[in-house]
Image (spheres, helix red, strand yellow):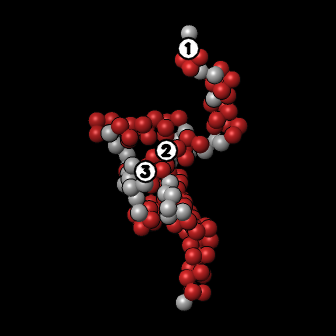
Amino acid sequence: HDEHDQPDDSILNQLTVETIFIKNRHDYLLEIITRRIVEANIEPNWLTLTFNDSTQNLFQSNLSICRQILPHSFEPTVLLIYSCWISMTMWNKQLISAANPTSLSLNRSPNDLFNLSIKFYNHIQIGIVQQNLGTLLWHTYLRSRIVTLTQLI
């Protein structure tokens, strides 16, 4: 009998839907999926189109299941917002630690991540949401870099 064959029951008992998604982070599943969207370089228009069952690939099929379970969390606008935010966050992390890129972006340049973030942003159809996200991105990631750049000039 090898101890390594048996999982630790105390850890397994902590991994429930309630502890992962409800008590701690209700947006955890959404974050995981949008990170995968960014990592896999999935085009923003895939998030807004609807497909019938015969033309769905595996990603679209899984996304349809998520939309059945959590329809509001996985609506196209929410996925576009999260994907835009995660792309910009990864871009920022790469610029801060160029010698130590994030694991999800090893094959992506900062320019690629920035452009991907803009692609997701441009596909958001609700103007006020797009404007608010743009303001948040500006104040969180871009403004300080522009100010620093202008001070250097």
Q: Element type at marker 2?
A: helix
* Comparing labels 2 and 3, the label whose residue is closer to the camera: 3
Residue 69 spot, x, y in % from top left: 53, 35
Q: Kindly identify the amino acid type of the residue bearing the numbered disc 2.
A: Ile
For marks 1 and 3 on the same chain, the one whose residue lies earlier in the sequence: 1
* Comparing labels 1 and 2, the label whose residue is closer to the camera: 1
Q: Which residue is mark 3?
A: 39
Residue at (48, 50) in percent of width and height: 103
- Label number found at residue 2: 1
Q: Kindly identify the amino acid type of the residue bearing the numbered disc 1.
A: Asp
Q: Residue furthest bottom?
A: 153
Q: Nearer the viewer, residue 71 or 93?
A: 93
Q: Quick check: 48 above or below 2?
A: below
Residue at (56, 65) in percent of width and height: 96
Q: Is residue 60 left or right of residue 31?
A: left
Q: Element type at marker 1?
A: loop
Quarter of the image where the C terminus is located: bottom right
Q: Label 2 crowding class (10 Å Cα cut-off): few <14, some 14-19, many 20+?
A: some
Measured Cα–Cα span from mark 1 to mark 2: 35 Å
Residue 139 visible within the image: yes
Measured Cα–Cα span from mark 1 to mark 3: 37 Å
Quarter of the image where the N terminus is located: top right
Circles 2, 3 touching at the beta carbon (< 8 Å): no
Q: Quick check: 60 above or below 81?
A: above
Q: Quick check: 21 above or below 100?
A: above
Q: Is residue 13 left or right of residue 55?
A: right
Q: Kindly identify the amino acid type of the residue bearing the numbered disc 3.
A: Glu
Q: Residue furthest top?
A: 1
Q: Which residue is mark 2?
A: 33
Rendering quarter of residue 132: bottom right
Q: Quick check: 145 above or below 5?
A: below
